[in-house]
Amino acid sequence: MANSKFEYVRNFEQPDSLLPNTWIVVRIDGRGFTKMCAKYGFEKPNDRRALDLMNAAAKAVVADLPEITIGYGISDEYSFVFHKSCSLFERRASKLVSTIVSTFTANYVYSWPTYFPDAPLTYPLPTFDGRAVVYPGVQNLRDYLSWRQVDCHINNLYNTTFWALIQLGGLDNKEAEKTLAGTLASDKNEILFSRFHINYNNEPEIYKKGSVVFRDYELVDADSNQVAQEMDNLAEPVQQSKTQADKDKKRRSKARVVVEHLDIIKDDFWDRRPWILS
Ligand code: ATP
Ligand code: ATP
Ligand code: MG
Ligand code: MG
Ligand code: MG
Ligand code: MG
């Protein structure tokens, strides 16, 4: 390409490559979804359609970007984890974040009519913000995901009790807030059970645990153990050969992407799916 006298402006671009060999988490969050809830009549405390739509968009993002190893969503937010060996866009934060945000938003808007057939989208349209954070080790990454899942649990227990007080108990917002001020988890469980005969444990898993999006190789390959073992053998993913990386990427892009509502704080989820963090 011919040099022009204008080309020097490129030097104003700041490098923003994320630290090598670290787990990259891109978290997106709906902008002004409190207003969106009111505008489109989201059911409180949990609108299942809105969660299913978030999950559909997240599935599309994971399917589109094989470098993503797992996603986790609650409420109007989703976290996407890029493997520490990821070299997409030379790990440039702005490229990674903007690609996730726009891929997610495009799919969210595209799928809206499937989940809200009776509430066509109008302005202001749904939009999302995003940020990237890197975590140096698997433990930090798992602690990050645990943090989000604990948040899901705390918020859902609060919201479930808050809205039961209003919808079933006839309280107004202020009275419900006051009732819950200073209460512990056990108090909220007790309020739900004694006043409304609701056993929190029986609430749907999607509300209590949030949503996990990942590739389920077991559902794709007949011999799942062999696949898990092969993935385990990629002991040094950062140094893996180009062809191995390509093969791995191809397999990832072919695998089925699933959404489940599981505990990701305990070891079990990870032990049973060694390919996710290997
Ligand atoms: P910001 O732009 O700062 O993120 P926000 O209004 O989106 O502002 P959040 O803290 O992200 O603020 O909160 C999102 C709000 O949307 C919460 O009140 C949450 O309960 C609500 N919400 C999100 N998803 C659902 C859903 N599926 N059903 C019911 N309410 C939901
Ligand atoms: P990347 O993902 O790296 O950006 P790309 O294929 O989008 O890959 P660009 O360098 O952005 O690569 O080039 C965009 C291509 O799309 C160019 O070939 C350009 O000519 C073509 N293109 C964009 N807009 C139009 C248009 N309105 N009409 C015809 N061609 C277009
Ligand atoms: Mg926000
Ligand atoms: Mg929000
Ligand atoms: Mg939020
Ligand atoms: Mg382009």
Image: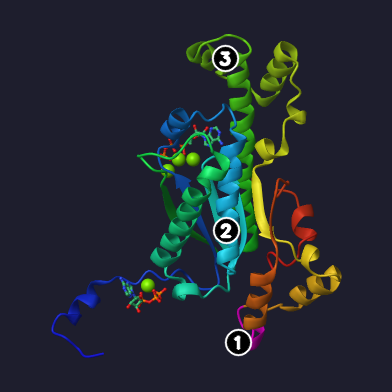
Amino acid type, residue under disc 1 in the picture = Lys
Q: Quadrant of the N terminus?
A: bottom left
Task: Tell me the kind of residue under disc 3.
Answer: Ile
Q: How many marks?
A: 3
- Identify the residue under disc 1: 242
On residue 166, the disc is 3
Residue where numbered disc 2 is placed: 60
Q: Residue at x 80, y 70 (%)?
A: 221
Say which residue appears at 58% left-offset and 18% top-offset.
180
Instruction: Identify the secondary structure beneath mark 3.
Output: helix
Note whether residue 74 is visible.
no
Q: Nearer the N terminus, badge 2 or badge 1? A: 2
Q: Which amino acid does label 2 sit on?
A: Ala
Mark 2 and mark 1: span between their CA atoms? 26 Å
Q: Farthest residue in the left direction?
A: 5
Q: Which colour scheme is used?
A: rainbow
Q: What stretch is highlighted in magenta?
A: 238-244
Picture residue at 55% right of the left edge, 18% below the top: 181
Relative horizontal placement of residue 204, taking residue 105 as reference (left or right): right
Q: Ligand 3 sits in which quadrant?
A: top left
In the image shown, does 199 or 186 lie closer to the viewer?
Answer: 199
